[in-house]
């Protein structure tokens, strides 16, 4: 795992993620105004924090990385701005629990959504 990530990583408890989601949906919607993210900042953050496990580039498909390619994530029917924010601001079992500030999450989400094929 890269040092840039571990600096910002907290291994909080892994339980209760599902329970948190309902509450976080409200929190995320309140703290993060929709559509305010900056995709180019998001791309930079993604290459610092997410690249170890995810393919983050628009052309990166089926890279065999352990985590889903961002292009694939962006194009899942279930992927929405809110769903991504909730995911990023909640805790996960399989992904390290980042402390992502809401406006960083916003930028990351804007970047991921920019990979959606319209
Ligand atoms: C240590 C490896 C690792 C790192 C670093 C990592 N992820 Fe993940 N990520 C995973 C794994 C494994 C999954 C699939 C399992 C899951 O959904 O929990 C995943 C799933 C996801 C999903 C959900 C896809 C879905 O099925 O809904 C999103 C969105 C995501 N990651 C975004 C990010 C972002 C943004 C970053 C950087 C801030 C990041 N990840 C960093 C391992 C990682």
Image (tube, rainbow, N blue to C red):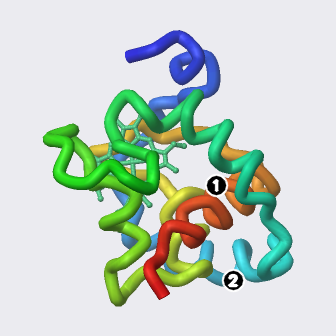
Tell me the element at label 1.
Answer: helix
Residue farthest front in this picture: 59
The foreground one among 51 and 117 is 117
Instruction: Specify whether 115 is left or right of 104.
Output: left
Q: Which residue is mark 2?
A: 26
Label 1 CB less than 8 angstroms from ligand 1: yes
Q: Is residue 31 visible?
A: no
- Foreground tag (2 vs 1): 1
Q: Is residue 101 above or below residue 96?
A: below
The foreground one among 19 and 53 is 53
Q: Where does the image place residue 61, in percent across and percent down from the top left?
A: 25, 54
Instruction: Specify whether 40 is left or right of 50.
Output: right
Q: Is residue 103 above or below residue 67?
A: below
Q: Is residue 74 above or below residue 26?
A: above
The foreground one among 116 and 31 is 116
Location of residue 74 (image quadrant): bottom left
- For disc 1, the neighbor class at 10 Å (few under 14, some 14 to 19, many from 20) is many
Disc number at residue 108? 1
Q: Residue at x 45, y 47 (%)?
A: 57
Distance in Å between CA atoms under marks 2 and 1:
19 Å
Q: Where does the image place residue 73, in percent across and percent down from the top left?
A: 36, 67
Q: Residue at x 54, y 23 (%)?
A: 5
CB within 8 Å, label 2 to label 1 = no
The mark that comes first in sequence, 2 or 1, is 2
């Amino acid at each position: 795992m890269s040092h840039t990530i571990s600096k910002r990583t907290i291994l909080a408890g892994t339980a209760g993620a599902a329970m948190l989601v309902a509450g976080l949906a409200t929190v995320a919607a309140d703290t993060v105004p929709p559509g305010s993210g900056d995709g180019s900042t998001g791309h930079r953050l993604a290459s610092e924090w997410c690249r170890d496990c995810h393919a983050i580039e628009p052309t990166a498909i089926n890279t065999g990385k352990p985590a889903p390619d961002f292009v694939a994530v962006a194009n899942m029917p279930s992927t929405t701005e809110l769903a991504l924010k909730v995911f990023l601001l909640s805790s996960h079992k399989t992904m390290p629990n980042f402390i992502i500030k809401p406006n960083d999450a916003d930028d990351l989400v804007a970047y991921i959504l920019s990979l959606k094929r319209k």
